[in-house]
């Protein structure tokens, strides 16, 4: 964990909402991270979740093995939401399905000589080799103009640039194909250009007010004038590549950066520079109500990451698959508090 951002030890009794949480649900998600964590001793004596574990035993599991730590007061927390979108697509290019979804290019490299690195923007992390040396990889605009067409990287084709763009922002997608089958796509890499929020571009340009913007509003703006919409999306030069999960893996749900299935309401995307993947994180969102109208308190597991998730107290809650999950995710933008559970020494 970077530095000592989470350095203030506290207690579980001091965490508002801790006792009332569903620790069994959190433990189920946490066990998905077991192979990644690589600490077999941590799971000795864990409750048997083959049936329905008692809530108290799951709570005791966390309390006996971990201690909660808070971040320093000068790092305000912020939480957003994300989801797995559903798209329509085809394995072959047709008049309707003409927008390619690309796999990771073989010529995309992330390690280059220092002499090449010094010539380029330090925020760029993806490159390709040329006769003149390594150069930044193709931007979104260059890719959409055909920069990858000769490489035959098409995983499938979809019918909507806007939905493809948001699938790239979310990092995964469930595509229903015209042959009646479905493919679950997962993140396979990116071109290495920095992420730019098009919502922020619209706000800064005075096109939309900050208090009215959400995902649906942005989508409507993009569709209202397709030419301007394409130009706006290309301001985000970051471009994400995908691979298709196997049928067995796809049945378990979308995968996060940790490589394990994501659990709606329990999987959290974080900045791994500050919170290691696999860590339990207790998230408090005072202005987000749960189903009972009480402030949101939830023990979540850091199982994903994202270009837009940067900083020690920045989280992105996974809400599930489809339109309803997307509606919740699109309206989730709140101040939050994070307590990272660290292994007792």
Image (tube, rainbow, N blue to C red):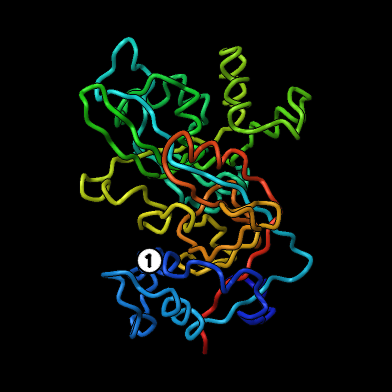
Residue 246 vertical position relative to residue 344 in the rendered view, above or below: above
138 and 235: which is toward the camera: 235
Q: Position of residue 260 (x, y in %)?
A: 36, 58
Pointer 1 residue: 28
Q: Residue furthest top?
A: 95
Q: Is residue 301 left or right of residue 122?
A: left
Q: Residue furthest bottom?
A: 345
Q: Is residue 272 left or right of residue 293?
A: left
Q: Residue furthest front?
A: 292
Mark 1 crowd level (few <14, some 14–19, many ≥20, 10 Å Cα): some
Q: Position of residue 204 (x, y in %)?
A: 77, 30
> Which residue is drawn at the image coordinates 56% and 33% (left, top)?
237
> Which residue is drawn at the image coordinates 64% and 62% (left, top)?
284
Does residue 135 show up?
no
Q: Position of residue 54 (x, y in %)?
A: 39, 75
Q: Position of residue 275 (x, y in %)?
A: 56, 66
195 and 210: which is toward the camera: 210
120 and 215: which is toward the camera: 215
Label 1 secondary element: helix
> Which residue is drawn at the image coordinates 34% and 78% (left, top)?
47
Residue 299 vertical position relative to residue 209 in the rendered view, above or below: below
Q: Quadrant of residue 210?
A: top right
Q: Is residue 16 left or right of residue 21?
A: right
196 and 185: which is toward the camera: 185
Does residue 274 show up?
yes
Q: Quadrant of residue 181?
A: top left
Q: Is residue 247 left or right of residue 215?
A: left
> Which residue is drawn at the image coordinates 34% and 12% (left, top)?
96
């Amino acid at each position: 964990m970077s530095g000592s951002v989470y350095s203030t030890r506290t207690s579980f009794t001091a965490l508002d909402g801790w006792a009332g949480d569903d620790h069994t649900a959190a433990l189920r998600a946490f066990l998905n991270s077991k192979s990644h964590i690589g600490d077999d001793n941590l799971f000795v004596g864990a409750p048997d979740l083959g049936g329905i574990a008692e809530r108290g035993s799951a709570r005791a599991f966390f309390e006996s093995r971990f201690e909660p730590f808070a971040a320093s007061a000068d790092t305000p927390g912020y939480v957003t939401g994300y989801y797995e979108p559903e798209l329509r697509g085809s394995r072959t290019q047709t008049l309707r399905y003409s927008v390619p979804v690309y796999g990771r290019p073989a010529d995309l490299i992330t390690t280059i000589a220092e002499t090449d690195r010094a010539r380029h923007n330090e925020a760029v992390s993806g490159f390709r080799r040329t006769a003149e040396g390594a150069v930044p990889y193709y931007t979104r605009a260059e890719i959409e103009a055909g920069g990858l067409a000769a490489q035959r990287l098409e995983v499938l084709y979809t019918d909507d640039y806007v939905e493809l763009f948001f699938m790239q922002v979310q990092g995964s997608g469930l595509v229903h194909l015209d042959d009646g089958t479905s493919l679950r796509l997962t993140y396979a890499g990116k071109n290495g250009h920095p992420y730019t929020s098009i919502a922020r571009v619209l706000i800064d340009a005075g096109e939309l007010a900050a208090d009215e913007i959400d995902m649906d509003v942005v989508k409507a703006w993009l569709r209202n004038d397709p030419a301007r919409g394409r130009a706006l999306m290309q301001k985000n030069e970051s471009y994400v590549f995908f691979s298709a999960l196997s049928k067995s893996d796809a049945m378990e749900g979308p995968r996060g950066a940790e490589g394990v299935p994501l659990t709606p309401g329990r999987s959290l995307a974080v900045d791994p520079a500050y919170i290691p993947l696999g860590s339990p994180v207790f998230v408090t969102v005072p202005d987000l109500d749960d189903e009972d109208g009480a402030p949101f308190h939830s023990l979540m597991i850091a199982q994903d990451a994202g270009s837009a998730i940067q900083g020690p107290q920045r989280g992105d809650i996974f809400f599930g698959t489809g339109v309803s999950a997307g509606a919740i995710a699109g309206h989730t933008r709140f101040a939050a508090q994070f307590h990272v559970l660290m292994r007792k020494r």
